[in-house]
Structure formats: C-alpha cells, structure tokens
Image (cartoon, helix red, strand yellow):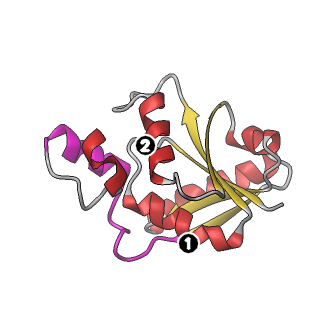
Amino acid sequence: MKIAVFPGSFDPITVGHVDLVKRALPLFDKIIIAVGINSVKKYLYTLEERTAHLEAVFATEKRVEVDTYEGLTAHYCQKVSSRFLLRGLRNASDFDYEKTISQLNNIVGEGIETVFLISAPEVSHISSTIVREIIKGKGNVKAFVPEEIWGNL
C-alpha cells in the first residue's frame, strides 16, 4: 500500500492544502494529513480545532486520514509505514527550503522520498501565514479557506 504523509501545522487549512491533497490522491492509496505538534510554536487555533477542521474538509474522502504527531516527521513516517512525504511548492523559496528538508528526511528516514507538487496557479499565492493575518485583522477569508470551515474561523 502506497501511503503518503502530508505534514504541517494547518493553522489554518487553506484551499491550497485541499488542492494539493486532491491532486495527489491518484498517486497514493492513502494520504495521512499529519498535524505536527510543536510546543515552542504559537498557534492561532488549538490542535483540536485544526484536526476538526481537517476532518470536516475531508469527511467524504475515505482515503484521507487525519492524525497528529510529535517529534521528527521521518520517524512518524516510519511509525505509520509510509515511504512518501507530500509537499507543495509555491515558489523558488519553497523549493530551496523543502529540498534541504527532503534530503534530511531521506537520510533520517532511511529512504523516505518526498513527492513535490507545484501549486496550481490559482492558489499559489495563498499561505497559512497570510490567512492568519487576514483573520487577525477581521478580514474576509472565504477565498482562502475551504467552505466547510468558514463559520469556524
């Protein structure tokens, strides 16, 4: 079974994340959206809220699972028997950062491969960081977050 792990903080999930998962589904038997727990990082939404948002968005997709993890992503992949990480690339800066991380994950994870998908043009400008700022500023985020969670933000 080909299992991909899509790690992140998803604070909040964006339409870019959803697009990436939907485009990757034909490549894998299962995608685990893994919400990383980082005690040092300050989040806008609690872990429970973030996982609930993800579960609501992917409620009808049987091959998508939502989970949480602490520690190294490569170790989590080993725990769930995944040989693949899924990552999206919006721009060259993303590539430079993600390339290094993928090489480290490959070493630490003993052969874990990172599969990169280029962001679709219509969502390539969206990031959770920007969406958080819009939310904090009481702006309208309907164009940036999945419909299933508009009312929960």
Q: Residue at x 43, y 43 (%)?
A: 53
Q: CA distance from mark 1 to mark 2?
A: 19 Å
Magenta-drawn segment: 118-138
Q: Residues within 10 Å of mark 2 (few under 14, many from 20)?
A: many
Q: Residue at x 75, y 45 (%)?
A: 77
Q: In which quadrant of the rendered image does the N terminus lie? A: bottom right
Q: Position of residue 149 (x, y in %)?
A: 34, 47
Q: In the figure, 88 relative to 133: above or below?
A: below
For the question of whether residue 24 can be seen, the reply is yes
Q: Residue at x 28, y 50 (%)?
A: 130
For the question of whether residue 153 can be seen, the reply is no
Identify the amino acid type marked 2: His
Q: Please identify the residue farthest to the front as the structure is shown.
A: 60
Res 44 quadrant in image: top left
Residue 134 sits inside the magenta stretch? yes
Res 22 quadrant in image: bottom right
Q: In the figure, 53 relative to 106: above or below?
A: above
Q: Residues within 10 Å of mark 1 (few under 14, many from 20)?
A: few
Closer to the camera in the image, 144 or 152:
152
Q: Position of residue 125 (x, y in %)?
A: 32, 65
Q: Position of residue 98 (x, y in %)?
A: 58, 57
Q: Which mark is residue 23?
A: 1
Mark 2, residue position: 53
Residue 5 sits inside the magenta stretch? no
